[in-house]
Amino acid sequence: MSREIVMLGTGSAFPQSSYNSCFLIRSSSFTMLCDAGGGAGIFRQLRAVSAGPSEITHMTISHCHTDHIFGAVWLIRHLVNISSDSSQPKRLDVYANRQTAHALMEICRLTFLKSYYDRLNDVIDLHVIETPSSTKIGDTIVSFFDVGSENVDQLGFRMEFPEDKSVVWLGDEALTDRNCEEARDAGYLICGAFCRYADRDIFKPYEKHHQTVKDVAEIAQKMNVRNMVLYHSEDRTDNKEKLYRAEASEYFDGEVIIARDLQTIRL
């Protein structure tokens, strides 16, 4: 069965040449959008990978920062808009922690026409996640957990596919001692790595509650992660992919994927 991760964006909150970090997980039984970036640019990114908004069946929003949630507002606004032309509007299952769910509804309330806001429940099923908890989506078990962020309440998950493949997502957080057990023996780990350790004095990741490539790679090695997908990073470094991979490979023996916008990763 074909499954894939499609990286729609890989940048941080203020990208220079990339879109904010978000991606699709595509399977035969569902398509999940994981975060949505900071605005209407989500539609451009979806078009670029030949994915229409109506293809998305599920969406998980990791936390309420603008570069992760505003694209979700635009997507929901679009679904409300097209619902008026259908007797059976498309429904979207949305997963978020309590803080993020409240923020999402408030932004919609404050920015939608009242007639659109009143139709919100026609197009979304909002699942407020208390962690830890699990649900089944198609043939896949999704286990939600709190990623242990020191900055904001943040939701992550571990997807277990029937063919013994797994994906662990930490939102824009790095792999740390607070969440590393969630990633033990993961097939694919998707997490933030803001910059190289060698460039920490330039980009100051720790001041932003982020970590470096070296930091993540060291813990991923201990947790026996097989494939490490790094994103939510600065995009000002020339030859970034080569330099990031070189630093990661000093500490991590598995496959290192320095994610690029619009990249597809086959599982």
Image (spheres, rainbow, N blue to C red):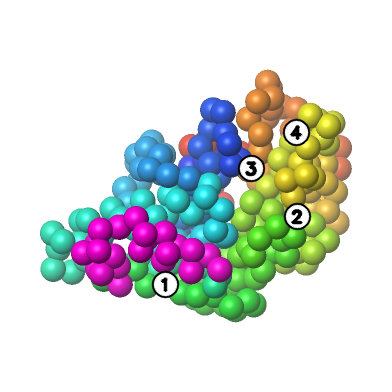
Residue under label 1, please give it: 126
- State which tag comes first along the sequence, 2 or 1: 1
Residue range corresponding to the magenta coloring: 99-121
Per the model, the C-alpha gap separating discs 1 and 3 is: 27 Å
Q: Is label 2 or label 1 in front?
A: 1
Which of 50 and 122 lies nearest the eye of the viewer?
Answer: 122
Query: Of helix, strand and loop, which one carries label 2?
Result: loop
Q: Mark 4 near mark 1, Cβ–Cβ under 8 Å?
A: no
Reply above or below: 99 against 247. Answer: below
Residue under label 3, please give it: 231
Query: Of helix, strand and loop, which one carries label 4?
Result: helix
State the mark number for residue 150: none
Residue under label 2, please give it: 175
- State which tag comes first along the sequence, 1 or 3: 1
- Identify the amino acid type marked 2: Leu
Classed neighbour count for the residue bearing mark 2: other residues with Cα under 10 Å, few (<14), some (14–19), many (≥20): many
- Residue at point 22%, 56% (across, down): 81
Per the model, the C-alpha gap separating discs 2 and 3 is: 12 Å
- Residue at point 30%, 72% (across, down): 121
- Residue at point 73%, 45% (across, down): 208
- Image position, residue 68 (x, y; %): 52, 51
- State which tag comes first along the sequence, 3 or 4: 4
Classed neighbour count for the residue bearing mark 1: other residues with Cα under 10 Å, few (<14), some (14–19), many (≥20): some
Per the model, the C-alpha gap separating discs 2 and 1 is: 27 Å
* In-image side of 124 versus 155 (left or right): left
Query: Of helix, strand and loop, which one carries label 1?
Result: strand
Per the model, the C-alpha gap separating discs 4 and 1 is: 36 Å
- State which tag comes first along the sequence, 4 or 1: 1
Classed neighbour count for the residue bearing mark 3: other residues with Cα under 10 Å, few (<14), some (14–19), many (≥20): many
- Identify the amino acid type marked 4: Phe
